[in-house]
Amino acid sequence: MKPPSTGTERHRSRTRARGPATALAAVAAATAVALNLAIPAQAASTLKAAAEARGRYFGTALTRGDLGISAEVNLAAAQFDMVTPGNEMKWDATEPSKGSFNFGSGDQIVSFAQSHGMRVRGHNLVWHAQLPAWVGGVPLNQVQGVMENHITTEATHYRGKVYAWDVVNEPYNEDGTLRQDVFYKAMGSGYIAAALRAAHAADPNAKLYINDYNIEGINAKSNGLYSLAQSLLAQGVPLHGIGLESHFIVGQVPSSLQANMERFAALGLDVAITELDDRIQMPADSSELQQQGTDYGRVVNACLAVPRCVGVSQWGVDDGHTWIPGTFPGYGAPMMWDSSYQPKAAYQAALSALNSGTSSPSQSPSQSPSQSPSQSPSRSPSASPSSSPSSSPSSPVPGACSATIKTINSWGGGFQSEVTVRAGSSAVNGWTVKWAWPGGQTISSLWNGVSSGSGSSVTVRNESYNGSIAAGGSTTFGFTANGTAATPTATCTSP
């Protein structure tokens, strides 16, 4: 029997082992396998397309070293629409000596993402690990100034280029208490609020997260974070999401994963699976690889069932370039592709879940913000009136396009919507959707589209990767907005 998860911290450098590069032909072979999966005829053939059709993203982590491995990055570009830098935005990489900043490596990751129509998840601004030695030598009464200067400088450098920041990374012990790191010793628990405020001031449009591991299920550690999130929101601190790292052992995905995501979502927070992998004690046998597929499918379906779960990111691309063996000796094979870039059962399960799994946009997280964190939220058999989906269709135009707005979740002072753009009897190459808000609503964040407009008028144009739609086909974009939920009539035009 394999040992249960011990909560062991990841390797301090989290530098992933390098395997031999494989010829580009391997990517073609992997793609060919993916295209022949037993999925519905109209289903998407890549993770990113399938996730986008569900209003989510599917991401990966890359390091600067990965960018030199053509087979790996080509596969990443084909399958993923979000990139997290593995090490390039951490403190030791960006401010190795006090006041001396270097963003070159992080800029390379951002440039790669932009050139492939991918968004970037910033990782990370404040973490007890991978700190340069000089930080530990700063007098405690100067730590807050040093921390805020680091956050402000880095977040300002990447302003407008990062979708979300893991502002505070891994702040909790397993028993639900905060780590006694240099930031806590200097500022107490208040360092987290100070970090979030500094990040928001530097990049007000980025989503701000607290990210940690072993918080995927309902336990002492996630209860501690839940209580902190309640407190921060009550203080008006700009916290927008919770990142669940999800470094699992095969067969040990927590049964309370979905319920845990629901209780954080009920606070008005986004949730994301940020660093997914599922390690196996080596050598892996066929039953373990099948169980790994079951695990990946469970994680994706849990995300689909929670409207405020915005996406899933795997921590890497393939088994040949993973941090697991170097940190957990005897374990490996945690990814959706093997070391030859061939898709495994995990890939097939994740793609199938996205294509055919049942999401429940009408489901509202049933736990109220005042519920004790030790209580497990129950699922309501019927949606509350505020979370019932509604839509306002526009009539299909032969040879052109139509757009339908649907509210999929709402909460006090805001709501989340999905917009389906559908081609008519002919394919479209580029689309523009317009509508007018009826009551002062404003968009707070938008994905899979580029928005503009003034006053009550909204215009959303396609991204570079989703402008082409086959005749009768569709794509989606989504947004969160401030104000009372509304579904105005939308129009769609195509050049």
Image (cartoon, grey):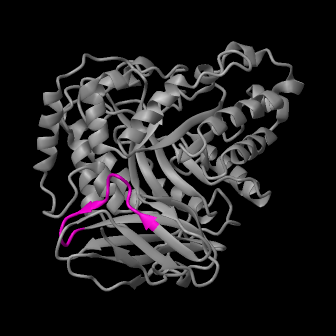
In the visual, does 7 lie left or right of 114?
right
Question: Residue 422 location, x and y as percent?
Answer: 28, 72
* Secondary structure mainly formed by the magenta segment: loop
Relative height, residue 348 to residue 7 (above, below): below
Question: Residue 17 location, x and y as percent?
Answer: 37, 18
- Image quadrant holding the N terminus, namely top left
| Among the 4 quarters of the image, the one containing residue 132 | top right
Farthest residue, direction right: 141
Residue found 50% across the figure and 24% down from its top? 105
Residue 89 can be seen, yes or no:
yes
391, 309: nearer the viewer: 391
Question: Residue 291 location, x and y as percent?
Answer: 27, 43
- Image quadrant holding the C terminus, namely bottom left
Residue found 53% across the figure and 43% down from its top? 161
Residue found 67% across the figure and 65% down from its top? 371
Farthest residue, direction front: 495
In the visual, does 7 lie left or right of 137?
left
Relative height, residue 33 to residue 452 (above, below): above
Which span is picked out in magenta? 460-473
